[in-house]
Amino acid sequence: MKPLPQSRHTIGESPELVKTITKPKTKKPLESLDQAQSEAGASNGG
């Protein structure tokens, strides 16, 4: 019962993105969102 790589990527992306957006106090919300989107896009595109 090994989780598919695609499934794992999607599942690991959700919490990571939420964490970045939920923690805008330390980092700028705009920069955090930009980085999260950039990473998500690269992971999704790749």
Image (tube, helix red, strand yellow):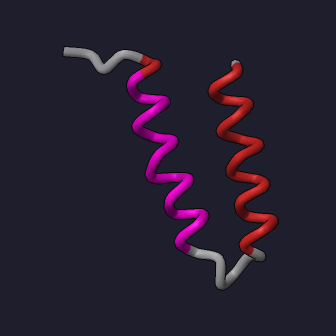
From the image, which quarter does the N terminus lie in? Answer: top left
Q: Position of residue 39 (x, y in %)?
A: 71, 41
Q: Is residue 2 above or below residue 26?
A: above
Q: Position of residue 10 (x, y in %)?
A: 46, 32
Q: Position of residue 34 (x, y in %)?
A: 78, 55
Residue interval drawn in magenta: 7-22
- Above or below, 12 against 20 in this view is above
Across and down, in percent, residue 42 comes to 73, 30
The secondary structure that most of the magenta stretch takes on is: helix
Asked if residue 18 lies in the magenta stretch, the reply is yes
Name the side, left or right, on which 38 lies relative to 18.
right
Vertical relation: 35 (above or below) 20 = above
Q: Left of 11 or right of it: where is 19?
A: right
Q: Residue at x 78, y 68 (%)?
A: 30
- Residue furthest out toward the left: 1
State which quadrant residue 44 falls in.
Answer: top right
Residue drawn where x is 60% and y is 63% of the image: 20
Q: Please tell me in which quadrant of the rendered image residue 33 appears.
A: bottom right
- Tally of numbered tags: 0
In this picture, is 15 found above or below 43? below
Residue 4, picture quadrant: top left
Q: Residue at x 46, y 40 (%)?
A: 12
Name the image quarter holding the C terminus.
top right
